[in-house]
Amino acid sequence: MKKVMLTVLSGMLACTLAGCSDSGSADVTDGAEIKKVSDLSGTVRVALAGWKLENGIDPLTGNETIGLNQYLEQTFNKMYPNLKLEVYQIPWENVKAKQSAMLLSKDVDILYTGGAFASQWYQEGLLRDLDDLIKSDPVFKPDMYLQGIWNNSYSTKSPDGSKQFGIPSVLGRRLTVYDKKMFEEWGVQPLSEKPTPQEVLEKAKKMQGNNPKTGEQNYGLYWSGNTLNGSTFVALTHAFGAPGAEGNLKDIKQVKWKLNTPEMAKVMEWLKEAAKLPPAGFVNAQGAENFGLAKNNIAIHLDGTGGSTMSEFRSKKDQALLDRFEPVMNLGPKGEGWVAVDPFVMAKDAKDVKASWEVLKFLSGYETQKYLYKNYAYTPTLKDADFVDANDKFVKTALKIAEVGHSELMDEANPFFMSDIVPAVNGYISKAASGSAPDVQTFLNDLQARAEKWSASLK
């Protein structure tokens, strides 16, 4: 008889996965035989941000979803029959505080988390480097991952880029999506595959106002005006060649700030002009609820996901909607933008490193990424994600953007970027939307002075 243990710990759900699942539910293996990989024994404690443990129903598509418990029962438990997992599921809204507490109290071995949190914990000495484990493991292939992420992401690499502390598991999707139907109604040429900020702004302005075919109010452009990570701003710094700083995060006190350059001024001037186009609610990340759907009234969505369109397609198989909304690359010269990466990482004080590495590999590997995509539409980090639906052009475009991605100092791993630059830029956008944008150079000079003062205050 299989033993099930369910423990509540500080509001987290913990499940000892020696087999606690609904064995009567659907098979996650596509009929493939799962063979034993190792007799390695031990217990590994895993803290997962946001994963679903139990089977359920996707609220958008109505499709059944297979929870982690069943997935592990049908795969991992057969591959590693003597390894026991203690899994703690933590809601995203509480994840930083609770996972930080677990690391400090040495109550966790493996974590799935946000990239900014992982970078911060690494710099605080709470995470283990993985290079020795990667080098000594002939089975693990780093080149299976998108190399733009593997080589460059602060979510998995040390601040100087010399050490690997995480394995990229899930991508955030941030691509430019436009409504082909609306472009046709206004008589505007489609966006290029790699549109520049100038092209986006020019074409967006042409579709602002009452639609010539329907008479309804249209908005040329949308992006989230209060984003926590400044993703649109980051894409624009790539596009205008405005890195914002020089140096590396290993020695952030020595970073040379370049926030008041002519290139950065072009970024802010673009934001000032563009802020006139979205619906007013964009400053609070509202107003695009119908984007990707039949009632859409926005021509171009920056840092979009295509999620609503794909959910509709999965549930209703309506090809017309899928044909209507088209993804293209982000705003950088190669189509790059800010690429969010959620990694798996290992605690510095993991109790059983060998067993923890096997678990980390499995949970960040091909089969688990396939499972997460098919059940929850998570975007994979793999170079050859052959399980992605042939119709899912949004994920395919996101993977192309990730492949050319690179991290600069305008990144969530940079503490000043998160604490000061992003709020300042969001505040500027809000004022620009109301027609009261500050003088660009004065704004940037102030931001530069604040950055230099912040660096000088570091010990």
Image (spheres, rainbow, N blue to C red):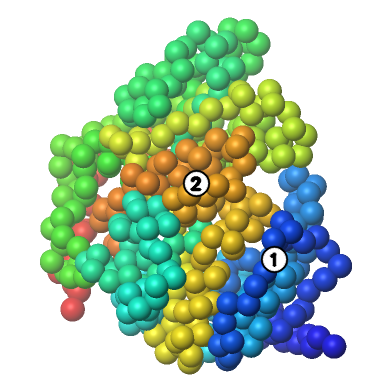
Name the residue located 42 percent from the left edge and 56 percent from the top edge.
145
Along the viewing direction, whichever of 132 and 380 lies nearer the viewer: 132
Q: Quadrant of the N terminus?
A: bottom right
Query: Is residue 357 visible in this depiction of the protein?
Result: yes
Q: Nearer the viewer, residue 233 or 29?
A: 29
Placement of 376 over or under 317, stated as above or below: below
State which mark lies toward you, 2 or 1. Answer: 1
The quarter of the picture where the C terminus appears is bottom left
Q: Earlier in the sequence, mark 2 or mark 1?
A: 1
Q: Which mark is residue 33?
A: 1
Whole-angstrom CA distance, mark 2 to mark 1, is: 33 Å
Residue 100 on image: x %, y % = 47, 80
Which amino acid does the dot numbered 1 rest on?
A: Glu
Which residue is painted at 48% across and 90% down in the image?
352
Specify the label residue 173 is tagged with. 2
User: In the picture shown, does residue 128 fall above or below 68?
Assistant: below
Residue 298 is situated, as x and y percent measured from the top left of the image, at 56, 26
Which of the two residues, 30 or 397, is positioned nearer the viewer here?
Answer: 30
Please give the name of the residue rendered at 44% of the width and 70% of the height, measured from the top-left corner. Answer: 139
Q: Nearer the viewer, residue 59 or 46?
A: 46
Callout 1: helix, strand or loop?
loop
Q: Is residue 189 left or right of residue 73?
A: left
Q: Residue 299: percent from the left, percent from the top?
A: 53, 24
Quarter of image, res 375: bottom right
In the image, 381: left or right of 408?
right
Q: Residues within 10 Å of mark 1 (few under 14, many from 20)?
A: few
Relative placement, left or right, of 450 versus 421 is: left
Image spot of residue 216 (x, y percent): 64, 16
Tag 2, which secondary structure? loop
Other-residue count near label 2 (Cα within 10 Å), few / some / many at <14 / 14–19 / ≥20: many
- Given the image, on which type of amino acid does mark 2 rest? Arg
